[in-house]
């Protein structure tokens, strides 16, 4: 197995050489001073003589970290463009389709902190390998699914694997590159690998779904994960947190319960309303579990998430910004995917190209943003990038069913460029704001809040979309000249099963008028979503610009 792994490792040598060349040729000028993050790191880190790995080991670590995050994020946009096909195959409702995405995001948000601690205690290499196996297993289950519930199970397994991979890959980079001045560059490469995954996903999923069927979109992660596993066995060094830690079971359980109940409650509220008994109960459980988590972490001698991390203004700011940004962004992508399919009637290939355009622009800027941190303070990269995203979201308010590819392309490119400026600095600032031996915990905490936002995004914006569309649908049907019996039938179906249900009704000659009215109602709901997303993103930009200002007095106590 090891001999086979060594042979496989040759296939990534070209990428490794690129990373090693960047390492040797990088600009070594110190970054724009951030008195807070530097002072926290300098005054609380243990004395280190030479913790960095040898160059060849460091290169292998960075390559495997990038490959791991690539595998972790493949299911997100791949599934987004094939949801209509999955719905048709199983006769799924809109609510059931929303759970296809949330089944992936929910365990990722719930277990990402736990995975970070497991990596610190038992070894990040081990957790990395387990994450790859779970990702491949989840893809295999979804590929062979004979019901919508089996797709959920496959997605949940893949999401659990992603929860293991995300904090582990960042912690591996932090261990291999303890110098804060160098780390931003490599986290930029990591962010580009993430965006490459989001770009490749829809480009591959579209043609595969149209030629072979939706289930074969799950084939790609399996060989990629297995190849990464084999290469990692041969090349990836092990690392742990240098300070002894214990598993914090009360904290892990209460965190998982709180996140799961919160996301479940918000998703179900979009279907049944916030007054529904199950929604109220879920949100109450989320609050109680969150209180238990805070109390547990304060009393624990080895907490899963050291709450003293939030004494760092930089860590707190980037964590809040990450959660708000991903709530707005992932929810926006969910709504945009429905717009391409329901309003513009695009196939999976055309929809995939549009999503890839946005993610591709973000990928191109990602690595550059990591290097720019040597010259431009993170607050300007994060704040400026988020303002670009907000401008693009507000510009999308003018699109309709007839908007051309060229007209929508520049908006998506601007949005992608903005996100590319944000991803690497946001992650690097959160990790660099704490001592390097807490990097796994900081990475897991930042990613956990980010994924909570990502899980809430489709639920919150989906509820806004439905509310806005349902509010205008009756009048749109009247304006289209649809008779009252047909109007009542359409409104009832949409109210029960979502906007996509209208396309499954046999309405005869009324079908074109009804679908036009549904599309117009959808646009009204989408405008509400875009306004909400734009305001949230602009608020996150202001938060970053204010809270990441350098030179303010450091009020926090030493961390770690």
Image (cartoon, rainbow, N blue to C red):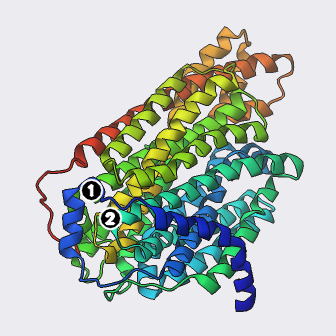
Q: Please state which of the two labelled residues, at mark 1 or mark 2, is closer to the viewer.
A: 2
Left or right: 322, with 401 as reference point? left
Identify which residue, 376 or 81, lies in the foreground.
376
Left or right: 334, with 322 as reference point? right
**Residue found 60% across the figure and 69% down from its top:** 17
Q: Quadrant of residue 64?
A: bottom right
Which of the image's four quarters has the C terminus?
A: bottom left
Label at residue 149: none
Label at residue 314: 1
Gap between marks 1 and 2 measured at Cα: 9 Å
| Mark earlier in primary sequence (1, 2) | 1
The residue where tag 2 is placed is: 432
**Residue found 56% across the figure and 47% down from its top:** 364
Q: Quadrant of residue 398?
A: top right
Location of residue 364 with respect to 228 vertically, above or below: above
Residue 472 on image: x %, y %:
57, 20
Identify which residue, 477 or 187, lies in the foreground.
187
Number of marks present in the image shown:
2
**Residue found 65% across the figure and 62% down from its top:** 155
Give SS at disc 2: helix
Identify which residue, 525 or 123, lies in the foreground.
123
């Amino acid at each position: 197995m090891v001999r086979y792994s060594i042979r496989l490792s040759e296939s990534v040598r070209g990428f490794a050489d690129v990373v090693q060349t960047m390492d040797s040729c990088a600009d070594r000028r110190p970054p724009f001073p951030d008195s807070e993050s530097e002072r926290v790191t300098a005054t609380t880190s243990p004395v280190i003589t030479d913790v960095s790995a040898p160059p060849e080991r460091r290169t292998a670590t960075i390559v495997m970290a990038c490959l791991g995050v690539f595998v972790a994020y493949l299911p997100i946009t791949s599934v987004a463009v094939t949801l209509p096909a999955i719905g048709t195959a199983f006769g799924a409702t809109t609510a059931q389709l929303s759970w296809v995405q949330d089944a992936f995001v929910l365990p990722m948000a719930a277990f990402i902190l736990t995975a970070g601690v497991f990596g610190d205690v038992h070894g990040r290499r081990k957790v990395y390998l387990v994450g790859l196996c779970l990702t491949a297993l989840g893809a295999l289950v979804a590929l062979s699914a004979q019901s919508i519930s089996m797709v959920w199970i496959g997605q949940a397994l893949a999401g659990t694997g992603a929860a293991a991979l995300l904090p582990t890959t960042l912690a591996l980079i932090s261990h291999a590159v303890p110098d804060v001045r160098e780390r931003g560059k490599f986290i930029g490469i990591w962010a580009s690998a993430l965006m490459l995954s989001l770009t490749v996903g829809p480009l591959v999923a579209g043609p595969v779904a149209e030629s072979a069927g939706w289930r074969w979109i799950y084939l790609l992660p399996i060989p990629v994960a297995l190849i990464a596993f084999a290469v990692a066995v041969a090349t990836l060094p092990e690392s742990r947190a240098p300070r002894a830690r214990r598993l914090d079971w009360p904290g892990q359980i209460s965190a998982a319960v709180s996140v799961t109940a919160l996301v479940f409650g918000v998703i179900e509220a979009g279907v049944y309303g916030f007054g529904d008994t199950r929604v109220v109960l879920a949100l109450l459980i989320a609050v109680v579990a969150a209180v238990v988590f805070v109390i547990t972490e304060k009393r624990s001698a080895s907490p899963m998430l050291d709450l003293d991390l939030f004494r760092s203004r930089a860590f707190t700011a980037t964590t809040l910004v990450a959660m708000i940004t991903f709530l707005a962004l992932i929810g926006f992508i969910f709504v945009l995917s429905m717009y391409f399919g329901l309003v513009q009637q695009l196939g999976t290939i055309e929809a995939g190209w549009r999503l890839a355009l946005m993610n591709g622009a973000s990928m191109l800027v990602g690595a550059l943003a990591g290097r720019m941190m040597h010259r431009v303070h993170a607050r300007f990269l994060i704040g400026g990038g988020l303002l670009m995203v907000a401008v693009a979201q507000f510009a999308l308010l003018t699109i309709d069913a007839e908007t051309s590819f060229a007209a929508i392309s520049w908006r998506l490119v601007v949005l992608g460029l903005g996100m590319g400026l944000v991803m690497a600095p946001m992650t690097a600032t959160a990790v660099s704001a704490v001592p390097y031996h807490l990097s796994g915990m900081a990475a897991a905490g930042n990613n956990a809040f980010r994924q909570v936002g990502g899980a809430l995004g489709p639920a919150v914006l989906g509820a806004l979309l439905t509310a806005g569309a349902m509010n205008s649908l009756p009048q749109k049907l009247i304006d289209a000249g649809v008779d009252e019996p047909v109007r009542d039938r359409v409104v009832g179906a949409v109210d029960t099963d979502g906007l996509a249900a209208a396309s499954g009704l046999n309405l005869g000659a009324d079908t074109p008028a009804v679908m036009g009215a549904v599309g117009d109602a959808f646009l009204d709901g989408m405008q509400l979503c875009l306004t909400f997303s734009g305001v949230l993103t602009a608020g996150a930009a202001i938060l970053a610009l204010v809270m990441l200002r350098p030179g303010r007095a450091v009020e926090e106590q030493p961390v770690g």
